[in-house]
Amino acid sequence: MAKEKSTRIADILNGRIPTGSEVRVEGWVRTRRDSKAGVSFVQVYDGSTMAPLQVVADGDLPNYADEVLRLTSGCALVAQGTLVESRGRGQTVEVQAKEMDVLGWVDDPESYPIQPKSHTFEFLRDIAHLRPRTNTIAAVTRVRHALAMAVHRFFHENGFYWIHTPIITTNDAEGAGEMFRVSTLDLSNVPRTVEGGVDWTQDFFGQRTGLTVSGQLNVEAFCLAMARVYTFGPTFRAENSNTARHLAEFWMIEPEIAFADLRDNADLAEDFLRYIFIAILEECPEEMAFFEERVQKGTIERLEDLVRDNFERMTYGEAITALERADQPFTYPVRWGNDLQTEHERYLTEKLLKKPVVVMNYPKEIKAFYMRVNDDDRTVAAMDVLAPGIGEIIGGSQREERLDVLDLRMEEMSLDPTGYWWYRDLRRYGTVPHAGFGLGFERAIQYATGLANIREVIPFPRSPGNAEF
RNA sequence: UCCCGCGUAGCUCAGUUGGUUAGAGCAUCUGACUGUUAAUCAGAGGGUCGUAGGUUCGAGUCCUACCGCGGGAGCCA
């Protein structure tokens, strides 16, 4: 039997449905108010929009006393009736119900955690299965979706191919982070080698495997065949990080472009960020207004600034000079050769420049083996995009395409080249200058929404000690 | 992982130098009112004070460990 056609609340409130229409609305109760005229006003949400729809239930509805007056926050219902201009203030239209069917009651309304009031984010994390019913989480989820769509649209429109790099992998992308082990071995009876170590040859894949910490090495292979490619998928880091901007499982976007150098890479990063944030401003105005008012003042202006202005660009050396001239003390010393600390990044983006900055050409000692060595032989063609409020949002580099230099770097860093045989092959056969970067998807959402903690911008956050749900 | 702080009703919080029966607002339930906008008014129910030990005649309050959360740091995206 065909399902009766229903109308999304977003479509009703956007004015796409003429008043006088008969509509069927499916959703959940946010609040119920009983008024002095023997009618009840039920605010219904269905996740499609910020504002709830007011459904008016007259006292002469057959189930008014038995059911309508028992509605509490969270009840699921279907309301059928006429879309009319509202007689009250606060909304332009409302649905005059002819029928209200309650599909799902709330068991024990007193202890139902989602109330029409503000909750702390810490509390909501403990009920991650119910928190999408709140305004903030629903709004951030819509923004997350819009951002993800914009990411794919940007790359698609610019001739990039989406490469589904493997989740299970043997490469650790050289110190990008600790890997989660993937194994089918019996943990209580692990096979041993004669030397006493774990005999990984008896494991499922015949060798040590883990969850990917980066798709970069794999996507480089496709880059050196299809020129413009990107990954967008889950990424895992088994670091014991307990911060507002780290997750053990997050989504990363990693474009990789051939016939390109570091400048092209920085241009791409800038165009890309501008594109996806314009999309949010245009597609999610209600959500942005909500974040501006309820989450963090200045969020919209920050996005508009980023979209309008060019990013600042400076070399690592220039950044060091700027920090040395800073009129404030730092806990960590500013010295050429040291990596930039959080306090240094914050000074650059939040005090000195007040906008995102691309810092390029870091000392080679503090960067990965695959980053291209510059002519000065002291620095590599690395870049970090630093943003006010969240720090490093993008990390990337031009890759070392010269096999002899790559081998030298691996030797310097005591890496065994045999494990990288196929990565070296890419330099043996038709090598070409290429570059790419990694963007933490959740950090981009944080930047767009102003949410202070990364655990609020992913549906079910994974962090040390937390994998419930 | 390190430093600092916090954990009291379904939620948000108060709780004095350790001392009788641990309080408020919201939510829930009952009633009043009957076109409301966080509706209003009256009443009622609701507590393993994060967990486990310890000190004490007596612990929400003091001590220890653990767990969780928050702020800062490290690692990074």
Image (spheres, coloured by chain):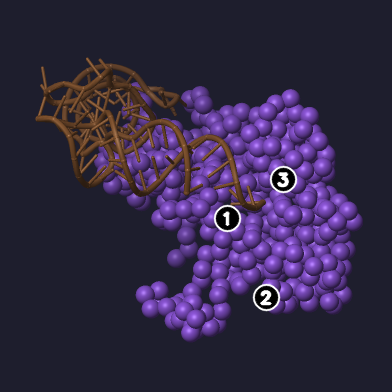
Mark earlier in primary sequence (3, 1): 1
On residue A383, the disc is: none
| Labelled pair 3, 2 in contact (Cβ < 8 Å) | no
| Amino acid identity at mark 1 | Phe
| Amino acid identity at mark 2 | Gly
Q: Residue at x 79, y 70 (%)?
A: A407
The residue nearer to you, when weighing A274 against A402, is A402
On residue A338, the disc is: 3
Task: Answer few, some or many: residues within 10 Å of disc 2's Cα (few below 14, many 20 plus, some between 14 and 19).
Answer: few
Mark earlier in primary sequence (3, 2): 3
| Chain depicted in brown | B
Q: Secondary structure at mark 1?
A: strand
Q: Residue at x 48, y 56 (%)?
A: A4
Residue at image mark 2: A419
| Amino acid identity at mark 3 | Asn
Mark earlier in primary sequence (2, 1): 1
Q: Is residue A461 visible?
A: yes
Where is residue A13? Give x, y as percent: 57, 38
Task: Answer few, some or many: residues within 10 Å of disc 3's Cα (few below 14, many 20 plus, some between 14 and 19).
Answer: some
Q: Secondary structure at mark 2?
A: helix
Residue furthest right as drawn = A375
Evaluate whether label 3 is on the same chain as label 2.
Answer: yes
Pick the quarter of the image with the C terminus of chain A: bottom left
Residue at image mark 1: A250
**Disc number lying in front (2 or 1):** 2
